[in-house]
Image (cartoon, rainbow, N blue to C red):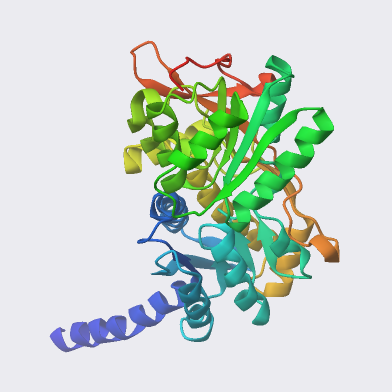
Amino acid sequence: MRKSLMAALLVASAVLPAAGLAQAKTLTIGFTSSETGKLNADATPQLRGFEMWRDQVNANGGIKAGGTDYKIKLKYYDDQSKAGRVQQLYSRLILQDNADFLFSPYSSGLTSTAAVVSEQFGKIMLTTGAAEGKTYKLGNKYLFQMYTPAAQYLKSALEVVKANNPKAKIALVYSNDGFSQGAAAGAADAAKSMGLNIVLNQSYSPDTTDFGPIINKIVSSGANVLIGGGHYADGSTLARQLYDKKANLEFISLLVAPDIPKFASLGEAAEGVTVPSQWEPSVAYKPDFGPTASQFTTMFQNKYHTTPGYHAAGGYAAGLVLQHAIEQAGSIKTAAVAKTLNAMDATTFYGHIRFATKADEHGLQIGHDMVLAQWQQGSDGKLESKVVWPKSASNAAIVYPLKKSH
């Protein structure tokens, strides 16, 4: 009896690992993240979005495609916010780590570098945290952009100015990185078409820490509106110094920085500042698949103990869109998944998603709309981010003009 039991156990121990291996198919998603360097504050919430998506997929048994369940493995490296490392590491992800699909790094500059590698090896890359449009106009076949393109970022801010003071004098002040330059160029074109007056068009180095000379130019120009900025480090510094130097602006809209929750730590320097946003928790879309905005927000708050901004939402949404494309294709083969992405015309908690399919702009995001958020004082005296434009999506009236401390 003991011999037969031992034999049965030995058979079971031999069979169970094999069965386990059969069920443990894995899809590797490769990317880099700026765990260090100047882009860390922007990249961290995007990484959290990726990770929360992975955890939820795996907890639910994986992605189902062609009768097979695939668990998700995220393989990523610290790019240190440096383009040189991105090129090296995306090659490694493909050639050594055998990544099946790719996510982009944070920022348009790093993504344009990664795109050269992903296209060279024919790998699908969902790009998030990367709004500059030039990368998608180079004949690439496997890039799919989650963000509204940079040229449209500041349009909503200009609409607010037009509605409140069409005779405003506008200073367009921006970082001279690719994304911010693209946003500024789009703003300049939009201002001209709206009949608005730009009295100062000034770029600055992304590494700028002393904005005194630029603020002097803003004041000397007679500007009463400022739009522009870049990323968190420079944008938050600019906001602080505008307040400290009493620039006395009636409206401020900055790229990226005010959407990071810790921007509120600037206190009175943050109050009233607006930010064009890819997504805000209060804007409710009816999703075709995946969670609602409130469900996503609650899940994120429970996991990370902070309210998600659009960087986190974009990261999660990139995973969600890739998952849906794989499941609809019933395959993990590049051609099949790319075909499904090209045909996608859907709504998620993050908004409408549709990709351009013409050769000269393939993968450019053409379905997603943005909103404008503003830091306002809540009933408890604490700063809260409120959606103020367009009015159809707003949950608060815009404060315009600002207090004269700006």
* Viewer-proximal residue among 394 and 246: 246
Point 66% across, 30% down: residue: 170
**Residue 91 locus on image (x, y percent):** 53, 81
| Quadrant the N terminus occupies | bottom left
* Viewer-proximal residue among 369 and 138: 138
Point 34% across, 43% down: residue: 303
Residue that sits furthest to the top in the current view: 379
Point 53% across, 47% down: residue: 230
Up-down relation of residue 133 to residue 277 (above or below): below
Q: Say left or right for 141 vs 74.
A: right
**Residue 316 locus on image (x, y percent):** 51, 50
Up-down relation of residue 33 to residue 378 (above or below): below
Q: Say left or right for 279 vs 189.
A: left
Residue that sits furthest to the left in the current view: 2
Is residue 178 in view from this perspective?
yes
Up-down relation of residue 195 to residue 348 (above or below): above
Q: Say left or right for 101 vs 144.
A: left
**Residue 54 locus on image (x, y percent):** 45, 57
Q: Quadrant of residue 242?
A: top left
Q: Quadrant of residue 236?
A: top left
Instruction: Report the number of discs.
Output: 0
Is residue 148 in view from this perspective?
no
Up-down relation of residue 64 to residue 14 (above or below): above
**Residue 315 locus on image (x, y percent):** 51, 52
